[in-house]
Amino acid sequence: MISLSGIRLWVMPTPTRNWTPTHGDPYRTVPYRPARMPAAESLARAAELRARMDERRTVRQFSTDAVPEQVVKDAIACAATAPSGAHQQPWTFVLVKDAEVRRRIRRAAEEEEHRSYAGRLGEEWLAALRPLGTDEVKPHLTDAPALIVVFQQRYWLGPDGAKRKHYYVDESVGIAVGMLLSALHLSGLAALVHTPSPMRFLGEVLGRPVNEKAFAVIPVGYPAADCEVPDLVRKSLDQVMVEL
Ligand code: IYR
């Protein structure tokens, strides 16, 4: 354990480098012997983290103020530490800062959302959404200074066109997005998971390869000065946890 400006590093980080396929490689290991965190410190950290995470809200009204770009990049790097099926890391995060590209995404998303809200969703779905106050107008796509468009790599596509299966792609990318949202929130930024449906236009606008399928658009920024969020209640721990 080393102490670095008040941050304790419990283990060596996993090296990051240009990844090449490990398909068929032999099983090799490195030691993993983190110093055990004292229970008192665990308890303090867990309580603090629980309180901070409970402050996270999905934001739909963003300030147009710029955010520190490195914070967003660090959050994406955090997301990319997620566990994944067969460690295939089947994700691509497209960081869109360009205002014209954000306008194009908004235009295409609003066209799809218009069809959704005008009938495609159906009465039951619209009723479920009513407490959230959402509609087809998506100003956050152009107000937020950055969008992170998350793509799933449905399969691996080699430079020569070779294909290989990816496993548990939905689960892997879902976990990574959870970690992304946590990292953004804990770094002081607000976000929204937006899933225009269908999302095919995102691959086209952003020029993504055929093995990638859009998973979500995540506007990132600061809440607008007059931001309001729906008056929602979270389920209590008793309601979400079963103890045996
Ligand atoms: N994609 C639409 C509708 C929507 C659906 C769900 I489920 C939400 O939790 C929120 C919105 C939209 O973005 O408005």
Image (spheres, grey):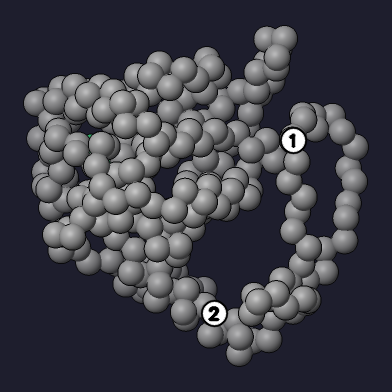
Q: Position of residue 18 (x, y in %)?
A: 74, 35
Q: Quadrant of the N terminus?
A: bottom right
Front-most of 77 and 47?
A: 77
Q: Residue at x 75, y 41 (%)?
A: 17
In the displayed structure image, the side of residue 55 where residue 112 appears, left or right: left
Residue 171 visible in the picture: no
Front-most of 100 and 130?
A: 100
Q: Which residue is outermost to the top?
A: 160
Vertical placement of residue 155 versus 241, above or below: above
Q: Residue at x 88, y 42 (%)?
A: 27
Kind of residue at disc 1: Asn
Name the secondary structure under disc 2. helix
Q: Quadrant of ligand 1?
A: top left
In the displayed structure image, the side of residue 36 where residue 192 appears, left or right: left
Kind of residue at disc 2: Arg
Hey, which quadrant is residue 5 in on the image?
Answer: bottom right
Name the secondary structure under disc 1. loop
> Residue under circle 1?
18
Vertical placement of residue 38 versus 167, above or below: below
Disc 1 + disc 2, Cβ < 8 Å? no
Front-most of 8 and 89?
A: 8
Q: CA distance from mark 1 to mark 2?
A: 33 Å
Vertical placement of residue 173 versus 38, above or below: above
In the displayed structure image, the side of residue 28 where residue 129 appears, left or right: left
First along the sequence among labels 1 and 2 = 1
Q: Position of residue 70 (x, y in %)?
A: 52, 51
The label nearer to you, 1 versus 2, is: 1
Vertical placement of residue 182 versus 126, above or below: below
> Residue under circle 2?
45
Hey, which quadrant is residue 205 in on the image?
Answer: top left
The label on residue 136 is: none
Q: Position of residue 178 (x, y in %)?
A: 47, 52
